[in-house]
Amino acid sequence: MVAKKVKRSDGRTYDELRKPYIIKAGVVKRAQGSAMVQSGKTIVIAAVYGPKKVIPKHLEDRDKAILRCRYNMITFSVKDRKKPGPDKRSVEISKVIANALSRVVLLEEYPRTLIDVDLEVIQADAGTRVAALTAASVALADAGIAMKDLMPAVAAGRANGHILLDLTKEEEDAEDAVDMPFAYIPSTGEITLLQMDGIVSKEEIKEMIALAKKGAEEIYRLQVEALKERYAALARLSEVVK
Amino acid sequence: MEENDNKEVEIVYPGSVVIDSLDVIPGQNVYRVGSKIISKRVGVVVKKGSIINVVPLNGVYIPKVGDFVIGEVVDIGVSFWVIDINSPYDAYLGMFDVKDYVEKESDLADYYDVGDLVFAKVSKVTRTKFVNVSLKDPQAKKLGKGMVINVTPSRVPRIIGKGGSMIKLIKDKTNTRIYVGQNGVIWISGENTEIAAEAIFYVEEHSVMKGLTEKVAELLDKRLGDGDGSKESEKE
């Protein structure tokens, strides 16, 4: 492929994640499980409640759990104040995140229950839905819910004629910009989220998917580390008490 | 969990390969893909013979037949009580599953009323997780006044200890009566209930730690020494 000498405004190479990229598990004390993801200037907190009883009861599924997501942007998360409450965009994002997570959570293990995943965007600088998805899968693992695997998510796209990983808002605002959120299950290779609008060639799509996969693998390692960190503390704390 | 005491504690997470071998059988909280055994949850690997299990470190209580649970009566039907067992699923206690002789036309509230605590055995769990509990077991009973605390259900085995060693230690030292439900509800009654509760929370928090029994004994001695002079002299 073409030479990848790209200059990005934040000094990254084309295939680098934003810095800092931090994942932390167990940030919300009263939730069953929780996680925070910071990707550059984007910060998302995920909290998981459940499995719990389904209310209202007629919604319950006798064969499996219902996974309900609520993606919400806090009013001060963007430059101009965001009007609080759900809108078309957040309803759509909640839905695609719930669909993606359903592929990885073993819902059949919890019949007639509800798993609530709350996603709060504290600060938005593009890539909030993938950050939310990354946080959600760590939070679900932290909640002790049975899962096939963790699910990393990242966006790839095109800006100023270059194929780039993990676009910022600034890059997304370029004239020819295309953004493609991407989530996948590393152990099976299943792609669970792939959205895009804009015009790109077949080659570019292939390139973007390959790039996103590479980024996702990196995020997967960070997810694992976050969980290890959280639970290693359990064992480590004991050494201090001595 | 105690068997692992001399080994490094290895923590696995969803998707991590526990072992790559065809000679072992996947047990609880793991699944097999090809020759690999993969964990479903965050937990500690425990090998029992050729069966590989992952003991989870967190999660809600999912009822299993044979478990003893502590529940609260939350509703009364014509022929059953509804018991809240600290789980996504409510349990049902049938009118003929209690030790008392229940008259057919009687009001069930005369026997167990809303708010009463019971130490019951899970007698049946259907595929869709309808749960029945029973008080017919000799160990099952109605619990009176006491302190009730909640712990993470998956750490209950550690609180009980190997052959009940941990809970016996706490009971003996604090001079309390303690009932531990597999659902993470613990009922304490007696002299030093607060100290017993503190010891239990300590065990819960440090459940993967090695040599925990000695630490708990130490903690109990320290706490009991503070307030009670007679206890201290007894030890020295």
Image (tube, helix red, strand yellow):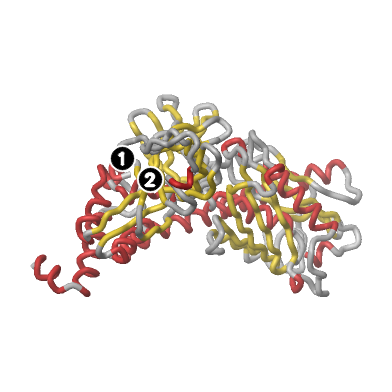
Classify residue B203 as left or right of residue A227. left
Task: Tell me what residue is drawn at x 55 percent, y 49 percent.
Answer: A141
Q: Is residue A4 above or below residue A99?
A: below
Classify residue A12 as left or right of residue A178. left
| Dot 2 amino acid type | Phe
Instruction: Label 2: state its secondary structure.
Output: strand
Judge whether residue A105 can be spotted in this image. yes
Q: On what subunit does the disc labeled 1 rest? A: B
Number of residues whose C-alpha sits closer than 10 Å to that of mark 1, classed few (under 14), some (14–19) or many (20 or more) = few
| Front-most of residues B79 and B115 | B79
Q: Position of residue A192 (x, y in %)?
A: 72, 42
Quadrant of the frame with the C terminus of chain A = bottom left
Q: Circle 2 sits on which residue?
A: B119
Judge whether residue B16 can be spotted in this image. no
Q: Is residue B131 above or below residue A124?
A: above
Q: On what subunit does the disc labeled 2 rest? A: B
Q: Is residue B181 above or below residue A169?
A: above
In the rendered structure, which disc, 1 or 2, sits on the residue that comes first in sequence? 2
| Front-most of residues A43 and B129 | B129
Q: Position of residue A187 (x, y in %)?
A: 60, 38
Answer yes or no: do the residues labelled 1 and 2 have beta carbons within 8 Å?
yes
Q: Position of residue A174 (x, y in %)?
A: 87, 63
Classify residue B173 as left or right of residue A43. left
Instruction: Label 1: state its secondary structure.
Output: loop
Task: Tell me what residue is drawn at x 79 percent, y 51 percent.
Answer: A180
Quarter where residue B226 is shown: bottom left
Number of residues whose C-alpha sits closer than 10 Å to that of mark 2, classed few (under 14), some (14–19) or many (20 or more) = many
Quarter where residue B202 is shown: bottom left
Classify residue A14 as left or right of residue B122. right
Q: CA distance from mark 1 to mark 2?
A: 8 Å
Q: Circle 1 sits on which residue?
A: B139
Q: Position of residue B71 (x, y in %)?
A: 44, 48
